[in-house]
Image (spheres, grey):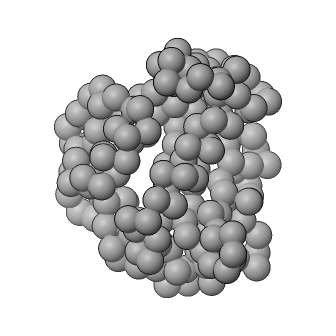
Amino acid sequence: REWTDDDANSVLEIFGNESVVQYTADEPYEDGMRRVIGSRVFFHEKNLGLTWGIFERKSGKVLGDIDFTYKDKRDFRVSLGCCFAPHAWGKGFASEALKEVIRYGFEDFPLFKVNRLEAGTDPRNFSAQKLLERLGFKNEALLRDYYFERGKFVDQHIYGLLRKDWAKNNVNAK
């Protein structure tokens, strides 16, 4: 579901953890959670993308955050990004949630017919790379010194998943 102001503590549980943000430009958040959620709402209101909080069905406990950025509408492309809380790692939650987001992107997204989903990851983040590959993404490029984060330049892998490749592997695809 989309984040609300009531989710400020849940956002802190994810992004306040150094192990979660270690491969991002972000420092662990310690305050300003309502501002963070407000920026996500603004992102949606300006029609640049969607950000969902991922919560466990039974307990309602926060598991993670997925961004669905479609500011490149003319290229029929959407960028995905996600962060999950350490208690959710290795349990299949990210895979389950991303499968549904991928399906939504290729089947139900109302603004345009998505042709390409892409995701970037730090080359040191082996778990994210394995996850993307299991979901059908191809490692298409290594962009050297792509980001300047935390005082140093960091490379970025770019992964892509095309509609036609996804449809081949999903017999029920529209």
In percent of width and height, residue 38 lies at: 71, 66
Q: Nearer the viewer, residue 116 or 48?
A: 116
If the image is split into quadrants, where does the C terminus sit?
Answer: top right
Q: Nearer the viewer, residue 4 or 170?
A: 170
In percent of width and height, residue 146 lies at: 28, 41
Q: Which residue appears at 40% of the width and 32% of the height?
A: 137
In percent of width and height, residue 135 lies at: 43, 39
- Residue 3, quarter of picture: bottom right
On the picture, is 95 further left or further right than 71?
left
Q: Nearer the viewer, residue 163 or 158?
A: 163
On the picture, is 108 further left or further right than 152?
right
Residue 148 appears anywhere in the view = no
In percent of width and height, residue 123 lies at: 22, 47
Look at the picture and state if 174 lies above or below 117: above
Q: Which residue appears at 62% of the width and 63% of the height?
A: 54
If the image is split into quadrants, where does the N terminus sit?
Answer: bottom right
Q: Which residue appears at 57% of the width and 61% of the height?
A: 65
On the picture, is 76 further left or further right than 87?
right
- Residue 140, quarter of picture: top left
